[in-house]
Image (cartoon, rainbow, N blue to C red):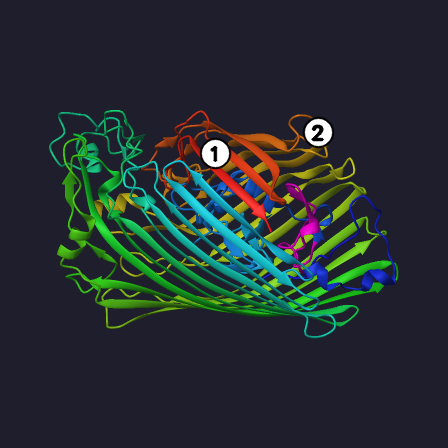
Amino acid sequence: MLLSGALHGAAPATAPARAGASDDVIKLSEFTVASDRASGYRAQSAITATGFGTNIIDTPVTINVLTGEFVQDIGANLQSEALRYVPGIQTNPNYESYINIRGFSGLQSYRNGQYRRQLYSTWGMDRIEVIKGSSSIFFGLVRPGGVVNYISKKAEFKSQGGDARVSVGSWEFMKGELNYNIGGENVAARFGAGAIDAGGWRNDDFKRETYLGGAFAWRPFKDGLLTVDLETVRRVNQDRESAAVLRSNSRYLGNAAVPANTAPRAWLNANGFATAPTFDIFAPVFGGDDPYGRKVTMGKETYSFYQSYTADLEYTQKVFDGLVYQLQWNFAIDDFEILRSIGGDQEPFADGTVRFRFGNFANYRDSYNFDNKFTYRFALGPTQHTASFGQESQRVHQDTPGWFDTAGRFQDGRYGAFAVWNPRTQALRNAAQERAASAETWNIFRRRTEKLLGYYVGLQSEFAEGRLRTIIGARRNEYSRKSYYERTVANPEGATPKTKETTPLYGALFKITPQLSAFAMYSESLEPQLGADADGRGLDPVKGKGYDIGLKSALLDGRLAGSVSFYGVKREDISTRDSAREVATARQPWFIYGDAEESQGIEFDFSYNPMTNWQIMVGYSHATKAETVTSVTPARVGLPLAAFPKDVFSVWTKYDVRSGALNGWSFGGGLRDSSSARFVADQNVTATMKGYTTIDLLVQYRFKFTGRDVSAQLNVRNLTDEEYREGNMGGWGDPRNFLFSLGTKF
């Protein structure tokens, strides 16, 4: 959970900091998201990094905030679509839960400060906040590149009304969403509902999604606030991981001398190419008008099913002027089941046929969080200080169905036999029939139980009338995991040792002027690795550390706001997939233990309003270093980090016409330019995703209809129909598509 109050809200960036008794008072509004904190695309304050509505220019941490207006203007239905405009972040078209931040990918998203596994649709989003660096002091067990936290819409007091929006688009896309708020003096409630029914640009694509959400707020006592947030999302769609992400070797593919059904690695080893990578190209095997197979999937029967439920409860009480107590409780369920192609479907034979099999996998996860924290603000002479201390406890249960193999080992999911398929001449085998005919059936469950106990303390201070701000803090993490089986298995997961680690954070910020700040930050992190190898050996936790040095601005009366930062991040004790051993043994997964990875670079992120009706957002990231720096396998040293381009530039702009014949119209658009990137960080896979440039356009029109405000919006995405891959799975980005939306408020 957050290190709440390690930093605190300050005076507006355009005014000099003031010391005085009034500054000791903590306002409850500092703990909540208010609509007036955001103006257009860029918010001046952020909740995620501090637990307060802290001015970003006064915080010695690199923070990016995307407002709800920006998310709506780009027509984003997934959080990942909006994050593509944040420097240093790479998303994944096939799997929106995986986010790559400063070269390190994983499940790094939170909802209202609580870790979530899946389903990052934009339903009910108020804003998205990204905190960069090793932020475990704020969030516990995390990756050191950073975290993403989206904040949901809250119930508002003294407000009544709602909004509705319908959208239609390419590939039979249809979406409807309704929100309504009713708020009195001390009680308020918000309700939201929505649904998506869509096809897709690939063969057999489909998506069905429903959403129900609501929030409740109550002031039971003076200076007390109780909020409750509920949400459920259900999605069934064509599993995008079953798309043809084909890879091969240029010496092997199309070589008539290769015997039938001979695997690439075996042929390379037997013909004097033992040192050549197994896969050095993406394989153009499908022919016809779709040479790279980007529209091909493994059939309409393959699917992903997700269901999530979450309940957040928070109570905040001002004890007296300088002290606030905050209690947070969260319960969440994330269930999913996948029927997809698995195994050799990414490795075509030399003649273009593909070896594949279907796998049926499921996971049922429930989690519980309970947090207590105190924030105390006080003055010592002319200096101001905020002390925070708190406790977090978390328990996670993850149940996975599996089956016994002939050696008595537990195997995830259910798998059919390998089949060979010629995509040019043969119809797909039916996934559902393969599952029904498979000899393997789910007959055993594995339960993983994870426990986390964290204690944190922090002190943020202001000196020299607020011009110098420092932060020092530490978090004690105690983590353990155990696995249980319904019966004895030959490959039980080795118990992960109990991990106890203290992760510090140090930061300082100096206000050169009221509108320009210089800052530096160093912190450490700890993260569990949840996997196990084919023999059941568990993976040890990874230790991370990182720093940021940079400048923040709110120049021109706040119209030019942003930051430039030089960063460095390192992860140690990493376990990396051993693809060579997996091919040799025909078993997976195997791991290479003890690697270390490091990334360094520079990021620019600025928002500029040349006029009140013109907004421009610019982002740029350049990696000066992003590679494996230590490994027990010498060939891995120097390998580029996976799916992390060296250079990425993005820009988005919107101009609102407020007079003349085009009054009420808005025009905008964006561009994203990315350099090439290595597909995976594996010496046996050197296939590269080429660089690309995508262009998006926006047209809006605001008008009155029967006395109500109505807005019409047209988004054209990937205008030039660029073919590109991105993300850790090498998934194809969407081709050119259109989205038309009509919204009103009532």
Residue 315 visible at all: yes
- Nearest the viewer among 264 and 593 is 264
- Nearest the viewer among 602 and 673 is 673
The residue under label 1 is 645
Which badge, 2 or 1, comes first in the chain's sequence?
A: 1
Percent coordinates x, y for residue 361 in the rendering = 28, 56
Write down the region rendered in magenta: 32-53
Residue 102 visible at all: no
Q: Secondary structure at mark 1?
A: loop
The residue under label 2 is 659
Question: As drawn, is 586 to the left or to the right of 223?
Answer: left
- Can you tell which quarter of the image residue 283 is in? top left
Name the disc covering residue 340, or none. none
Q: Secondary structure at mark 2?
A: loop
Percent coordinates x, y for residue 392 in the rendering = 56, 68
Percent coordinates x, y for residue 278 in the rendering = 27, 35
Is 34 colored magenta in this rendering?
yes
Question: Is 365 located above or below residue 17 in the figure?
Answer: below
